[in-house]
């Protein structure tokens, strides 16, 4: 895990969100909430103003992959 997270660390952010919200379906999360939750993650140091729909979507898809894997096990 990197020491600090930024918007481009979608995979690691997805893992952390899956750990923090294990029962939350990532597809049910609004981007406004996702943005807030990402910026509140421990180790996140990205500029909140530098996020965009593409970066949030990449994070959501990484989280979804992690969520699905955890549901299967």
Image (spheres, grey):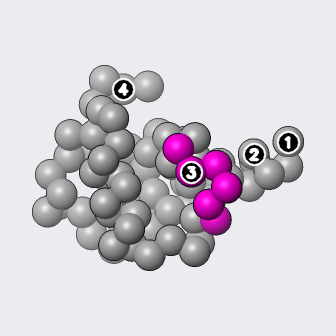
User: Could you say which quadrant of the image residue 56 lies in?
Assistant: bottom left
- Vertical order, 53 against 26 (above or below): below
Label 4 vs label 3, nearer the camera: 3
User: Where does the image place residue 67, in percent across and percent down from the top left?
Assistant: 67, 53
Q: Which residue is mark 1?
A: 73
Q: Quadrant of the N terminus?
A: top left
Residue nearest the viewer, comparing 24 with 43: 24
Which of the labelled discs sits on residue 21, or is there none?
3
In the image, 39 versus 11, the foreground residue is: 39
Return the residue at label 4: 2
Which residues fall within the magenta stretch? 20-25
Q: Is 57 located above or below residue 1 in the figure? A: below
Which of these two is toward me, 5 or 54?
5
* CA distance separating discs 4 and 1: 26 Å
Q: Earlier in the sequence, mark 4 or mark 3?
A: 4
- Looking at the image, residue 50 sits to the left or right of residue 32; the answer is left
Dominant SS in magenta: loop
- In space, the residues marked 4 and 3 are separated at their CA atoms by 20 Å
* Residue 34 position in % (x across, y down): 40, 64
Q: Earlier in the sequence, mark 2 or mark 4?
A: 4
């Amino acid at each position: 895990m990197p020491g600090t997270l930024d918007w481009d660390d979608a995979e690691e952010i997805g893992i952390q969100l899956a750990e923090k919200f294990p029962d939350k379906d990532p597809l049910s999360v609004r981007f406004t909430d996702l943005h807030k939750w990402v910026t509140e993650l421990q180790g996140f140091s990205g500029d909140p103003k530098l996020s965009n729909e593409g970066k949030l979507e990449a994070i959501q898809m990484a989280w979804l992959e992690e969520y699905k894997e955890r549901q299967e096990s």
